[in-house]
Image (cartoon, rainbow, N blue to C red):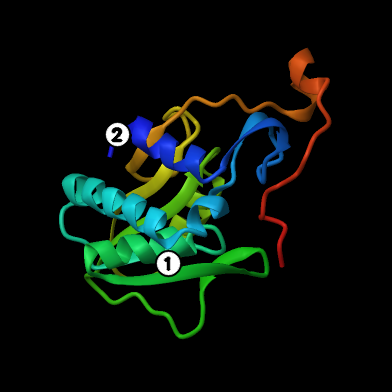
Amino acid sequence: MSQDEVLDEFRQAGALLEGHFILSSGLRSPVFLQKMRVFEDPVRTERLARALAEAIRTRFGAVDLVVSPAVGGIIPGYETARALGCRALFVEREDGEFQLRRGFEIKPGERIVMVEDIVTTGLSSRECLAAIRRHPGELLGAACLIDRSGGKADVGAPLVSLCQLDIPAYPADALPPELAAIPAVKPGSRGLA
């Protein structure tokens, strides 16, 4: 799947939004990728996950386990694991830190890829990878549908993405005038309980 085809999937789902957005990282951006609009369509999600699974196989070879951060990574992680023919687990926050819960376990020797939805700064990915590294297994790398950092985000492992965009993100005190003139909206999910 080409980068343009990935963006077309987001456009067709009404998930590529323009305006003034406060991202879950706290940064501001003129573009927001509302991935849950993509994930509400199982057929669209499956297409993207199959393409991501193919990119993962090409880069990392065989995979035994996909681990994703809750909440946004659960659907693409599960669907990508299904396309890879492997297990899917997720980590969730407990006391502010990602943990394996619900009886999930990583088995010694399992070849693991962390799957995210969208990477902006890489913070959630780094936190998820730190949780994975506390368990046995061989961490191969990370993967996401869209890397909106243009390849600049440090996720702490090799990163595969279906689409790499260089979408600007600004601290609140360093907005360009045209963005500052638009009222800010906070559509993200990091603060959800």
Three-letter amino acid code of the residue under disc 2:
Ser
The reply, left or right, for residue 190 in relation to residue 174 is left
Q: Does the rendering let one see residue 144?
A: yes
The reply, left or right, for residue 66 in relation to residue 29 is left
Front disc: 1 or 2: 2
Q: Quadrant of residue 162?
A: top left
The 10 Å Cα crowd at callout 2, few under 14, some 14 to 19, many 20 or more, is: few
Q: Secondary structure at mark 2?
A: loop
Q: Quadrant of the C terminus?
A: bottom right
The x, y position of residue 100, in whole percent, is: 48, 74
The residue identified by callout 1 is 134
The x, y position of residue 30, in whole percent, is: 66, 27
The 10 Å Cα crowd at callout 1, few under 14, some 14 to 19, many 20 or more, is: few
Please name the residue shown 54% across and 49% down the image. 35
Say which mark, if any, is on residue 2.
2
Q: Does the rendering let one see residue 133?
A: no
Please name the residue shown 50% across and 83% down the image. 102
The x, y position of residue 137, in whole percent, is: 28, 67
In three-dimensional space, the C-alpha distance between marks 1 and 2, rounded to whole angstroms, equals 35 Å
Three-letter amino acid code of the residue under disc 1:
Arg
- Which residue is at the front of the view, 191 or 7? 7
Please name the residue shown 63% across and 28% down the image. 169
